[in-house]
Structures are given as C-alpha cells and as structure tokens.
Image: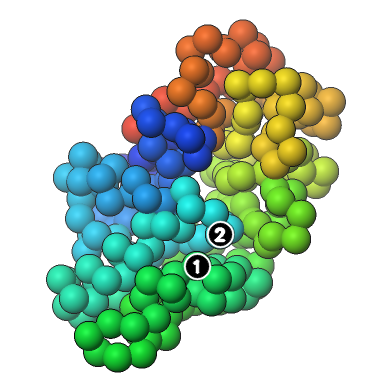
Amino acid sequence: MREFALQFIGTGDSESLRFYNTNALITRNGKHLLVDCGWTAKRALHERGLRICDIDGVFVTHVHGDHVFGLERFGFESRYVYRGHRIKLYLHESVLGPLWDECLRGCMGYSSDGENAIEDFFDVRIVETTFSWEGIDFEIFPTTHTPGKPSFGVRAPRRFTFTSDTNAIPDLPEIAKEDPYVFHDLYLSGPSHPAHATPEELMDAYPETLLRRIWAVHYGDDIERRLDKLERFAGWVPQGMVFAL
C-alpha cells in the first residue's frame, strides 16, 4: 500500500458520460479522503472495491452537482445503512450555507427521524485556510470559477495542487511553486468558456515552469481529439490514474 496516494476516480466535465465527475480519492494509512463527491462518486468507488463506509472524509470545493450531489447518498447511507458512520465534511464557511440551505436540505431536511440539520449526517469541519487529515496538512485557496459563488482549490504542500473548477488563477504560480503536480481544470472542447480555463488562457497567464507541471482534468468526452492543445503541458489524467505522493 502506498503511504500517500491520489487517484482521480473521475476526470470528466459535468456533461461527461465516459469519465465520471472530476472527484479525487486520497489514500493515507489505509484511510480515504474524497475531494468532492458528485453523482458518480458511489459508482466510481464501487468499481474500486470501496463503499461509502470506507470514506473517512470529504473536502468540498464548491457547490455544483458534479461536485456535491453524491453527498445525499453518502449522508443517508452513513446514517441509516452504515449506522454510526460519520464522514468528516471539510469545507470553507462560505460554502456551508449554499451546500445545505440551497442544495442538500431539499432532499435531506426531513427523514423518518423528523427535521434534520447537516450535522445529523456529517461531522462538519469548517476550514479557514488549512486542515489536517492523517498527518497531512492541506491548504485551501480561492479560485475564479463562477462570479458570486465561493469556490476553492486544495493543495498538500510540496506534493500537489488541485484547482477543481476554475479559470486561470493569478496567484497560482506562487501558490503551487513547490508542488510537482498541479491538477488543473482545462476546457478543451471549444475556444473559450466563461467558467472553465482553456489552454490559451493558461498559456497567457502562467509561466512555462508552471505549465510543464499542469495535468488536465475536468475535460470532455472528446479528449483524444484535443490532445494537440496540451503540447506545452504535463499531460492529461486518465480516469483512475494513481499518483504516489
């Protein structure tokens, strides 16, 4: 077993039918932490021999369906199927309200036990700038995804940076300067996108030293026809690829 590993159990954009939602699985000391939990997360874990009760924690980057819709299943099954299992839910305070009040509450606000709060399903851990999990210190940083919507990336210093959904991030060259792997949202299926970075945008915004460490995630099902756009980058992450960190 690797001491510390990251595997993308999904690498596709929100429309992908081939590659599942872009969610990452971090493994350390035999425990598992998800970064985001979209509607394909349960199936992706099942295909790797894992169940919801095997997940120790989830960090939520932002509230869009391909990043949080799986939390309904994770919450209900933790409480009612795997009785007593409580997943640690790591998130910035600005994400908590939209996640519960504007998303999950409509599905989970009431159950056979009556009215519920998010704490009835998860062990909520508010993150300001850093959090620790299994002896690893993680840092979070704001991203530029959708105007008015809080969104964050996460990094394990000197190991990796994962932007989740974003456009170019002006401070990323400084944020990720020590990290050998930078997993970056990259929209490859067209010339531009208002909420997702394009190769052209990143080549204008980032130095060559950063581009050569960027691995593309959150791409479309036509990725094989778009690889010429990644010539100045490290490459793309096939679904299921494992990085030993």
Residues at discs 1 and 2 in contact (Cβ within 8 Å): yes
Residue 42 drawn above or below residue 126: above
Quarter in which the N terminus is drawn: top left
Query: What is the secondary structure assignment of the residue under circle 1?
Result: helix
The image quadrant of residue 167 is top right
Residue in front for this viewpoint, 232 or 80: 80
Q: Which residue is mark 1?
A: 103
Q: CA gap, disc 1 to disc 2?
A: 8 Å
Query: In screen coordinates, is 109 left or right of 227?
Result: left
Q: Which disc, if any, is residue 233?
A: none
Q: Amino acid at mark 1?
A: Cys
Asked if residue 63 shows in the view, the reply is yes
What residue sits 80% from the left and 46% below the top? Answer: 171
Q: Which disc, if any, is residue 63?
A: 2
Residue in front for this viewpoint, 161 or 117: 117
What residue sits 43% from the left and 73% below the top? Answer: 106
What residue sits 42% from the left and 85% below the top? Answer: 117
The image quadrant of residue 204 is top right
